[in-house]
Image (spheres, rainbow, N blue to C red):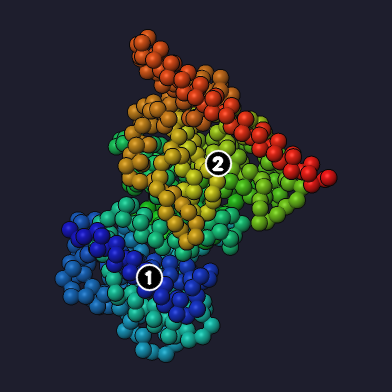
Amino acid sequence: MPDITDLREKTVAFIDKLKLVTSQYGLAGSGSDYKVVTRMLLYKFFNDKFGYAVKKLDALNPGFPVYAKRFRDAAKWDAEYDSFTADEIEDLFTNLPPSVPKMKPEHTIAHLQNASTQGDFSALLDSTLLEISKLNEDSFSVSTNGGAKIRVFDSISHEVNEERDAFARALVSKLSDFNFEHVFGEKYDFFSGIFEYLLKDYNNDGGGKYAEYYTPHAIAQIMARLLVGEDANLRNKKVYDPSAGTGTLLMALAHQIGEDRCEIFSQDISSKSTELLRLNLILNNLSGSIHNVRQGDTLANPAHKESDNTTLKKFDFIVSNPPFKFDFDDTRADLAAQTERFWAGVPNTPARLDPAKPKMAIYTCFLQHIINSLAPAGKAAVVVPTGFITAKSGIEKKILQKLIDEKIVYGCVSMPSNVFATTGTNVSVLFLDKSGSTDSVVLIDASKLGEEYKEGSNKKKRLRPDEIEQIVKTFRDKEAVDDFSVVVSYDEIKEKNNSLSAGQYFDIKIEYEDITAEEFNARIAAFKAELAEQFAESRKLETEIFARLEKLSLVENRGNE
């Protein structure tokens, strides 16, 4: 069994080498940087996944051992693949599972490296990637709302203006330093760390209409575990994120349910985030759901609908960390006209639009969309600003009222401040159950948990593993813990003006100490004596102060004579 720590270090080192090449050619920190690094990472992954899958093809298809044996027996599988005939290649493709990328012999890394000394090498790299992309178009393309397909690869060399051949050679030379075959047996917990490492330089605000972000792994893990539990009998579950970002929440949820027991659906307006989501799905053996990934505006044009193409599709589980504020004046009127869909209302356009400081609480629209998209027994976990859970007016109050009146909310966990990469807003996680079958609500105040760390010049907080377990166990056990958690009825919540803030339900405790009458009298006598001493000292000070003032007055009078 390979050492996981060693594999992680090698994977990270491989990513760093690719980043070093892009930096040397002037792409560091640019939009081209993440494109080149992620495409080369994915090309390497495709190459190694193809070889690995063919070697195990007889295990996947017991009646099909021939090609697997040829790959396994060869000193180098890619060299053996060069000897395959066109008919054998076509036969091999027919028997590969849909999740395995197809590659022809001339598409392998070894083939490119052998040709690296020839002229116009950058064009060869580009054409190789485009051919692989076309060959795998049906399995790995992402669709936009308009139906256009975003292929898995496009050309790379045009990202630099000069020395394109040298740039291409430098990238391809790094592809033999590491082999993914050793990590294909690992699952989400391995790749989530790798993916977060990959994102740390690429997940910045800006560059798009919405902030491109990811939810910290600890928060994603808590949401998935509390939403799903440990039910091993779940089957054919449809899971959804309407503001998917790079897919961290979906990956955690799919892992908790079981990758082979759920189908993923997503939508996000950001093309960059959607590309990274696709990579995340591929890394986590969830490429079968790529055809359900949509890039587009979820609120203005929801992509996932029932067969009538009008009714919103209903899902068993929904997770979401929607953008909190965004000014959507261009689509606001259309959304406001959909009164059945946005039953609590749509935020008004501010008098002055400021792209740097959006004011419209768009998360309230996402919350309504999520509630509308839940199946009759569907559950959801949604990140909201903590201010929402005590809302007293407006759209927020109407949504909160519905969640409580219909017993949809069954839990709320308020997180520590500064746990997200791109916002200092305090956040809470709502847990919803459309069935309304619970009689009580678990409220947890985890705001005092977490350890501080610095991310650049910013102070952040992250939950420790034992604190994650504390939150999960307390929530599942519906346990009341002093100054941490309460379990309350819906009537109690209504008495508190529909507040979901745990702190408003904590008892104010007064400490009592049993003492005898003699001890009480002795303490009172001591207090009196101490107070008498303090009064005497006070009178002495008063006398001294007045005496000094009298002297000061005499000095002033003499000066006027």
Left/right placement of residue 278 relative to residue 465 reads right
Dot 2 falls on a residue whose secondary structure is strand
Q: Residue furthest left?
A: 73
Q: Which mark is residue 311?
A: none
What label does residue 385 carry, if any?
2
Q: Position of residue 320 (x, y in %)?
A: 49, 44
Residue designated by label 1: 16
Of the 4 image quadrants, the one containing the C terminus is top right
x%, y% of residue 49? 30, 64
Identity of the amino acid at label 1? Asp
Q: Is residue 192 above or below residue 366?
A: below
Q: Residue at x 59, y 24 (%)?
A: 497
Front residue of 57/25: it is: 25
Q: Secondary structure at mark 1?
A: helix
Amino acid type indicated by mark 2? Pro
Q: Position of residue 269 (x, y in %)?
A: 57, 54
Whether residue 513 is visible here, answered yes or no, is yes
Query: For mark 2, does the 10 Å Cα neighbourhood hold few (<14), some (14 to 19), or many (20 or more) residues?
Result: some
Pick the quarter of the image with the N terminus. Answer: bottom left
Considering only vertical position in the picture, is 174 above or below 312?
below
Inter-mark Cα distance, 1 to 2: 35 Å
Question: Which quadrant of the view contains residue 440?
Answer: top left
Q: Nearer the viewer, residue 296 or 96?
A: 296
**Number of numbered discs visible in the structure rendering:** 2
